[in-house]
Image (spheres, helix red, strand yellow):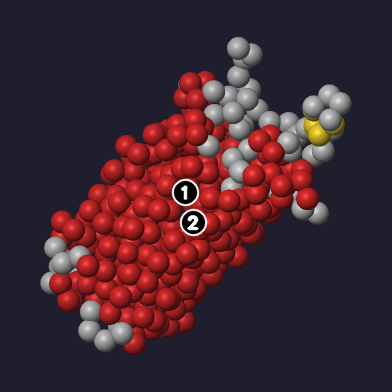
Amino acid sequence: MQVASAMARRLPFFYGWVVVATAGATMFVRNGAASLTLAVFVYPMARDLGWSRTLIAGAASLGGVLATVASPLAGWAVDRYGPRLVLLGSVLVLGLSTFSLGWVSTPLAFYLAYATGRVIFSSPVQIGASVAVSQWFIRLRGRANAFLFLAHALGMGLFPLLAQGIMAFGGGEAWRVAWRGLGLLVWGIALVPVALLLVGRPEEVGLTPDGATRSPAVGKASSPPADPIWTSRQAMRTPALWLLAVAGGLLFFVHAGVNIHQGAYLRDRGLAASTAAFAIAVNAGFTGGGSLLWGFLAERLPVRWLYVATACTIALASFLFVGVDTVGEAFGVTALFGIGLAGMLVLPSVAFANYFGRRALGSIRGIAEPFVSAGQAVGALLAGAIHDATGSYQTAFLVFGATALVGAVVVASARPPRPPSPG
């Protein structure tokens, strides 16, 4: 905290952007447990270990189920102890769980290691990083979250490519070396920045959101941005909280099912392993660009209707996956899905903060995230089960497209709540 306090006073720009970069480092490395990262391991692990794709995807599902329990606790811990401690512990555990995947030889060991990382991915990192950024920004919240999830998107693209590169040149069972390398990368990138630079709220270092100046004489911001003040109990009594939570569950049901299985699906369609890996990278690249697009639009247009547009984009991409059988089609559909995924990442963070304010944002996000985790768990498992039963993922993609359209209707119903009564 001493390093951060000194920097906050001396930097020629607002320290909130350092927080965005530091939180972004945790979002970048959480891709050690991302569904897109697992996607490039499904084929070689199934081949070498003799496991079904349903079994491998089940580890992600288990992590999602456990995250439904962990998310409320993570949200409470972020409010109680601050994002720094939560994220620091998360990076330590994530690096260890990812590194240990290089030694798994039984389903039990794989489930323990990957599900642990998946819980970290879904709960404390997701909640801690987005809450930290939303605490530092109100007026510029859209773009701040856009840059945060741009970091996540960069990790989405680079982690699978790095893993695929190691496997391409590493010989037999090179996927083991790839897992170990990713674990070391998690620690190397995020541990030191989080430990030294992350600050949970601007008030902790004498600043205010968006960089508004503080008058030493009266201790108040010169032009404080408007921000609603909700407790978690008050938020739980609003339809908006539950509608946003359900919508998140529906859309992340689609997200996990598509992301985990798209690499294997493209291989099944006759495309090369390198093509499948680069299609995943295209997905990630457009997720990054889309993050900036949705984030800047969220400062100008109603976030609810942008979220509806996101859900419709996800639906269209899911339906188009059914007909993919060329390299161009693979890149085009994964790009479209990446744009939609960007909105799914950025817009809920902005919506929850805009609707309910900063006071209990961690706890409020913790209430909603179990829906997301449950959706991811079911989506990953269902797609694998449909493939194992029918020999194809095409029925799964039709289910995903229809589900995303239902999510669009739910989001459209999530009107901003009226400010709570004082006291």
On the picture, is 94 further left or further right than 144? left
Of pointers 2 and 1, the one earlier in the residue sequence? 1
Residue 227 picture location, percent across and down: 68, 31
Helix, strand or loop for disc 2: helix
In the foreground, 205 or 280: 205
Q: Amino acid at mark 2?
A: Leu
Helix, strand or loop for disc 1: helix
On the picture, is 419 further left or further right than 81? right
Residue at 32% x, 69% y is: 179
Residue 82 picture location, percent across and down: 53, 37
Work out which quarter of the rendered image holds the C terminus and state it: top right
Residue at 47% x, 24% y is: 236
The answer to whether residue 281 is above or below residue 395 is below
Tag 2 near tag 1, CB within 8 Å: yes
Work out which quarter of the rendered image holds the N terminus and state it: top right
Residue 233 picture location, percent across and down: 48, 21
Residue at 64% x, 44% y is: 2
In the foreground, 29 or 408: 29
Instruction: Residue under label 1, please give it.
Output: 88
- Would you call the spot at circle 2 few (<14 residues within 10 Å), some (14-19), or many (20 or more)? many
Q: In the rendered structure, find residue 242 and report the number of the disc placed on it.
A: none
Q: In the rendered structure, find residue 191 and report the number of the disc placed on it.
A: 2
The image quadrant of residue 137 is top right
Residue 252: in sight, yes or no? no
The image quadrant of residue 271 is bottom left
Residue at 80% x, 27% y is: 219
In the foreground, 98 or 283: 98
